[in-house]
Amino acid sequence: MKRLIIQIGLTIAIAALIGCAAKPIVKGDSELQHKKATFPKIGQQIHVVTGGLVHLHTDYRSRFAYRLSQPLSIRFTLGWIKVTKDDVLFEASLEGQDVFCTVRNVYYDLLIGLVGPTRNACFVQSEKGKFNKVKAHPGEYWFTKEIDPAIDYIGSEVPFIADGKPFKRELIFEGSQNGNIFFTERLYEMSLDAPSKAKPLFAKIDSIPTEIFLDGAVLNVTSFTSNSLTYNLIKSWE
């Protein structure tokens, strides 16, 4: 009888642990956002020197992802939480609290045994760039544990191509010679930080002011020298 009571009690405890818990809701910079911008404004007069940015156009969707700066392995209730530096976290709201939650399951439950991680975990920041608490839900309730010392985290923007277009296009002034104005067009198709392609463009100037056409963009050039350009944007890239 005593053994039966123990088995029943253990069954009830496990059932409580595997109940339904509140779900984190994605929010803030981790929500998918459309980033579309153009520089300069149409009609705005701009003066640049050699190497200066003439035109910029962005058109992509992105969200921010976060990662720990070092791995974390910590005992948590009846199990362990193990998070690597490669695990992706997203900003979320959980039961009215701002948190950053793992996409992957990272909580290992010792009651269940060696079946792999069964739950994700959420972190609470003490200040921007640092987590001092971790939360997990072995069952229907979320539990919290202090992280001491606090652990650093970093965020980065993750872009997604919109309609097959480059994330970003830049037009750079490269100077002029013998009535020709030279430019470089940079296309960012794989990363926001480094161009995947760069191609030279030039326009022949016969008189001032004049409109020039550069791979779909239109500029009105009002003056230029060998190392400077004054213009306004008539039509931006699309």
Image: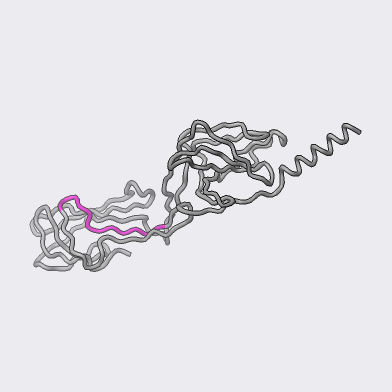
Residue drawn where x is 43% and y is 40% of the image: 129
Q: Is residue 99 left or right of residue 110?
A: left
Residue 7, image x, y percentages: 84, 36
Residue drawn where x is 55% and y is 36% of the image: 83
Q: Is residue 20 left or right of residue 162?
A: right
Residue drawn where x is 69% and y is 33% of the image: 110
Residue at the extreme right: 1
Query: Is the residue 20 above or below the residue 211 in the image?
Result: above
Q: Of residues 135 and 205, which is closer to you in this image?
A: 135
Residue 52 is inside the magenta segment: yes
Residue stretch in magenta:
49-60
Instruction: Classify the position of the N terminus by image quarter.
Output: top right
Query: Is the residue 155 above or below the residue 223 in the image?
Result: above
Q: Is residue 157 left or right of residue 197?
A: right
Q: Quadrant of residue 48?
A: bottom left
State the predominant SS element of the stretch in magenta. Answer: strand
Q: Quadrant of residue 18?
A: top right
Residue 187, image x, y percentages: 32, 53
Q: Of residues 78 and 115, which is closer to you in this image?
A: 78
Number of on-image labels = 0
